[in-house]
Amino acid sequence: MDAPQTRRRREWTIAAGLFLLALVPSIAGAFRVGEIASGAAETAANARFMRMPLPVVLHIAGALVYATVGAFQFLPGLRRRHNAWHRFAGRYLLVPAGFAVGATGIWMTAVYDVPATDDGAVAVSRFIVGGLMIAFLALGVAAVARRDHLAHGAWMIRAYALAMGAGTQVLTSGPALLLFGEPDAMFRLIQMDAGWIINALFAEWIIARRRAAARRPATITA
């Protein structure tokens, strides 16, 4: 198989992996919207969403758009072949959806009556992650405005990594939930923060590789 085909297959493998990472939280989000739309009976688990549906519906809709569009925005080959679409999708879909995800995450943390294990330190983490996501998106927009495409990509990768934390948190909390049941506040904090930290570290690894690749031609010709 020649190099372009190999690169293309690798890129689509990455996109498929991102879709899989977002699959479980997307299904959970669709179920939640279905509950709200159908006027399901209130329970201890859904009462806050049924009584104030707007922030969670905006959050879920934004997350679905952000996860889906973002999976294609980071494929170099697709970006080169369809640069006009990359700019359009980033400006009118990805960035607005990302701001919606970050802002509604902060909104829900501030106003919802959450279980005790999601209060306190977990709430602080959610405020920090939501704020960082909004800041990273703003920095990414500022970078592309000054035509610093490398910095633009780095900030957008960081924002996307935080948003996809919900998918990684399924992996960091799901097995323990099945084995040991509901966690206490400390383990809930560890499980939630682990998802964001893993994604953030992976994002920095990708950014470092991109920077090294960008410097490589200059190194060869020096």
Image (cartoon, helix red, strand yellow):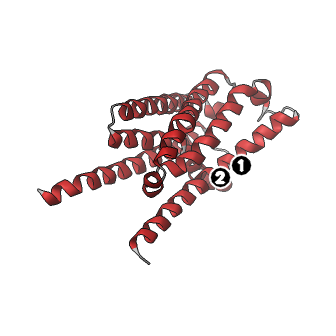
Q: Quadrant of residue 32?
A: top right
* Image quarter in which the C terminus is found: bottom left
Which residue is painted at 62% across and 40% down in the image? 63
Disc 1 to disc 2, how far (Cα)? 6 Å
In the image, is residue 5 above or below residue 183? Answer: below
Question: Quick check: can you spot residue 193?
Answer: no
Q: Position of residue 138 (x, y in %)?
A: 44, 29
* Image quarter in which the N terminus is found: bottom left
76 displayed left or right of 173: left
| Residue placed under numbered mark 1 in the picture | 27
> Under tag 1, what secondary structure?
helix
> Under tag 2, what secondary structure?
helix
Instruction: Return the residue nearer the eye: 115 or 145.
Output: 145
Farthest left residue?
Answer: 222
How many numbered callouts?
Answer: 2
| Circles 1 and 2: CB atoms closer than 8 Å | yes
Which residue is painted at 61% across and 56% down in the image? 20
| Residue placed under numbered mark 2 in the picture | 23
Q: Position of residue 141 (x, y in %)?
A: 42, 32
Q: Position of residue 97 (x, y in %)?
A: 58, 35
Question: Quick check: can you spot residue 21?
Answer: yes
Which residue is painted at 33% across and 36% down in the image? 147
Q: Please, what is the three-letter code of the amino acid marked with disc 2?
A: Leu
Q: Please, what is the three-letter code of the amino acid marked with disc 1?
A: Ile
